[in-house]
Image: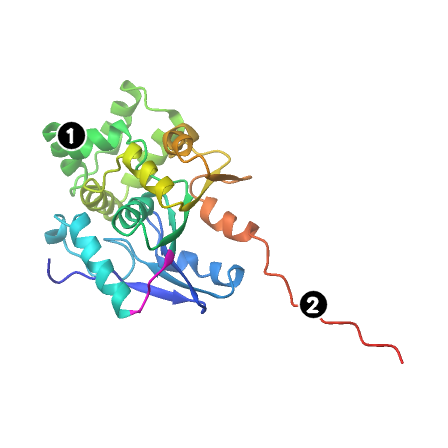
Amino acid sequence: MKNFALHFQKFGQGEKTLLAFHGFGQHSGFYAGLAKKMPGTTIYSFDLPFHGKSRWTTEHLSFNKVHFINFTEHFLKRHSIDRFSLVAFSMGARLAFALTEAFPQKVEKLLLISPDGITESPWFRFATRTAAGNFVFRQLAGEKDYTPLLGRLATFLQMPEKLRKIAIRQIQDRVWRQKIYHSWMVFRKFRLDVEAFASLVNQHQIAVEFILAQKDPVIPRRHVKPLMKKTGHAHQYTVKKASHFTVLSRWIEQLPAPEQKKTSPPEHL
């Protein structure tokens, strides 16, 4: 696939390497503050497709795991990276899963922040995997604002109130409607086989940590549990007073500051 590029920013410096993937509507700069909390680590933070400064067009909707793995393989060789850890939030977790599947022997640790893709939303499935759903989705992403109609449809289909409000807010703007459509159409191809993935993680003894918001109607805890149950050695951390849209920043804020080097007290004469 030609003429596409995943833009990235580099934060911090050190022998350890961390590849970072943000969530929908964000950009690579969301991980800038993480470098201060992880000294000795070089962080490469990527802009997702149709986000930030990544070079992308609608011609690249056929982008899939093979294209992404080829890109990453070239990136790792170019930067002489042999081992790395991954941190990913929400939709970005789909890329982290793909890299772990492709390079399990290279992955040291997985930090999954309210990860998307473990339990697929019926709304996502309908919109991206069915002809009828994709037709409706494509119309919603167009010039005309179908917000009132979608609101009535969501109520009729008994979409949870909090989730309905989030969806309505995001599709009111044409640019955001198109970003949602293009992002979903790309990421629909990044599917996870939970059983096989958990087996791979356990086999290679990859450390896994689930970082979840205290209240999250977008990625509720029950959507993450299928993978949590099968990775017995995984750790779980709940970010207090955080929602889906604040969990990443609050997690970084709550990480302990690196220990200051202790100096020996002066000797008494």
Kind of residue sitting beneath label 2: Lys
How would you classify the magenta stretch by its main secondary structure?
loop
Q: Is residue 126 magenta?
A: no
10 Å crowding of disc 1: few (<14), some (14-19), many (20+): some
Task: Look at the picture and state if 94 lies above or below 80.
Answer: above
- Given residues 153 and 3, the one toward you in this image is 3
Q: Can you identify the residue that label 1 sits on?
A: 133
Kind of residue sitting beneath label 1: Gly
Could you tell me if the residues under marks 1 and 2 are in contact, i.e. CB atoms within 8 Å? no
Task: Look at the picture and state if 9 lies above or below 112.
Answer: below
Question: In the image, is 256 to the left or to the right of 175?
Answer: right
Q: Report helix, strand or loop for mark 2.
A: loop
Q: Can you identify the residue that label 2 sits on?
A: 262
For the magenta stretch, what is the residue range?
A: 79-84
Residue 242 rendering spot, x and y as whole percentages: 51, 40
Looking at the rendering, in which quadrant would you find the C terminus? bottom right
Task: Look at the picture and state if 203 lies above or below 15.
Answer: above
